[in-house]
Amino acid sequence: MNSRNFNTSIKPIVFLLCLLPALVLAIRLWLDKLGANPIDAIADSTGEWTLRFLLIALLMTPLQKFLKWRWPTHIRRMLGLFAFFYATLHLITYLWLDQFFEWGEIWRDIVERPFIAAGVAAYLLLVPLALTSNKPAMRMLGKRWKPLHRLAYIATLLGVLHYWWMASGKSDVSEPMVYALLLGLLLLVRVRLPTRT
Amino acid sequence: MLIKTKADLTEADVTPEHIYRDRRRFMQQGAILGASTMAALTAPLALPRRAHAQSPDLVQSPFSTDEDKTSYEDITTYNNFYEFGTGKDDPARHAHRLKTSPWTLSVSGECDKPGTLDIEDAVKPHTLEERIYRLRCVEGWSMVIPWVGFPLGDFLKRFEPRSSAKYVEFETLHDPKQMPGQRRPILEWPYVEGLRMDEAMHPLTILAVGLYGKKMPNQNGAPIRLVVPWKYGFKSIKSIVNIRFVEKQPTSSWMKAIPDEYGFYSNVNPDVAHPRWSQARERRIGEFRKRKTLMFNGYADQVASLYAGMDLKKNF
């Protein structure tokens, strides 16, 4: 198989792999294997997968540049869109299963609680990125596309902060710390990369 | 034939469920549990009456709620007990390391008869009651748990506290070998909690040694724990080894860890939000929609007078 074929055939496989966490979650919910508090388990899982996919998506460019592989650029968009997919599931879990669309409560939550505000801000930053992740939008935006999509770093930073602030109320930030370190590493690599390819 | 009273029905309601829920675990553990342990466990539980030798026959309490009880499985698999890890399922997975027999409980401080007692001697003089209480976790979920225990006040009186005893301080066992969560400095170990003297002597406050009519599972704070139903769950300290009568307000582990977010009183209060989340509503485990959180967790009639004139926003 030549490299061009490999680069295109990898896509459906990655697509299915990216769906796996959602599938596992759905099956565990169906089988009542999410424990005593399934709604919390769904919120935790979708939140964590959002951060994981954001970090994996951000890893693709460094991989491509350092190892001269082509395939990371081919799946980067899909990974980013899956991060948005899990973020949307996470947000819906909050709006529906946690708040039951009581908009007054939700608004108070956003205004009064920094960790909720950080999460909502992270999501709002991801929306334009998801909307402009197609070829026509790229063409239309031209040179402005790249700086716009650097917002992914800010969104991930806010996402990690969201997790950190929530966990520190329970005195255990060991898990958000792992995400923070990985993001720090990715940012460091970015700084040391040549700005132009 | 007797027509059963409501209290009897509640009791009858409890026993079959625990037998049903627990048969498999009981059989699995049966071989492991020594005969002497079993005797020690069932003897005090069967003290009041021996009419039904098989099932613990417990005195029912007027303080019990008739709300639907949370299942035994949920109560024993969804726990906050940081000594065994910070995940909800960590305590159920790791608490088997805890050795609850022998167990000594020491009572000291501002009292005339301090002492160190075996757990059996600590429990023996008391009549065990079933207390079906709501439990509200500070994280926003709640359960209804049929505890087995006796009033803390009755226990404390045995040590003849002096008038200088204004507060009671409690300590959990500190042994990282048995409690692997203590190997990480998440909280200052051992876990410390405290009550004001009148809170400790209040008839709702109990020392619990079991739930669902059987011995306290390790993950729920075996062999003996505090239950203060009108306060957030973390006040109800587990696996107690030390009790001290003190003059000054104790500083609890959570007050030390995050003083802005966790106060001494920690009364359930829907109007005082935790800085990171609202406390207005809660998810009762097993229910889909959230329900409104009640002032003092629904025990306002019994305990509101303890806090008359206090600013509960300041004294959170």
Image (cartoon, coloured by chain):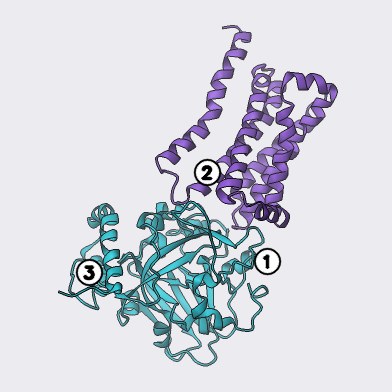
Chain colours: A purple, B cyan
How far apart marks 1 and 2 lie (CA) works out to: 29 Å
What residue type is disc 1 on? Asp
The residue identified by callout 1 is B260
Question: The numbered mark 1 sits on a residue in which chain?
Answer: B
Dot placed on the residue nearer the N-terminal end, 3 or 1: 3
Crowd around label 3: few <14 · some 14–19 · many ≥20 (10 Å): few
Q: Is residue A187 visible?
A: no
Q: In the rendered image, which quarter is residue B15 located in?
A: bottom left
The answer to whether B133 appears left or right of B316 in the picture is left
Q: Is residue B69 above or below residue B302?
A: above
What's the residue at 58%, 74% (across, down)? B265
Q: Is residue A111 above or below residue A52?
A: below
Q: Position of residue A121 (x, y in %)?
A: 73, 44
Number of numbered labels in the structure image: 3
Q: Secondary structure at mark 2?
A: helix
Q: Are marks 1 and 2 on the same chain?
A: no
What residue type is disc 3 on? Ala
Q: Nearer the viewer, mark 3 or mark 1?
A: 1
How far apart marks 2 and 3 lie (CA) works out to: 43 Å
Which residue, as the protein is rendered here, is positioned at the far right? A143
What residue type is disc 2 on? Ile
What's the residue at 51%, 84% (across, down)? B198
The residue identified by callout 2 is A42
Crowd around label 1: few <14 · some 14–19 · many ≥20 (10 Å): few
The answer to whether B288 appears left or right of A88 in the picture is left
The residue identified by callout 3 is B39
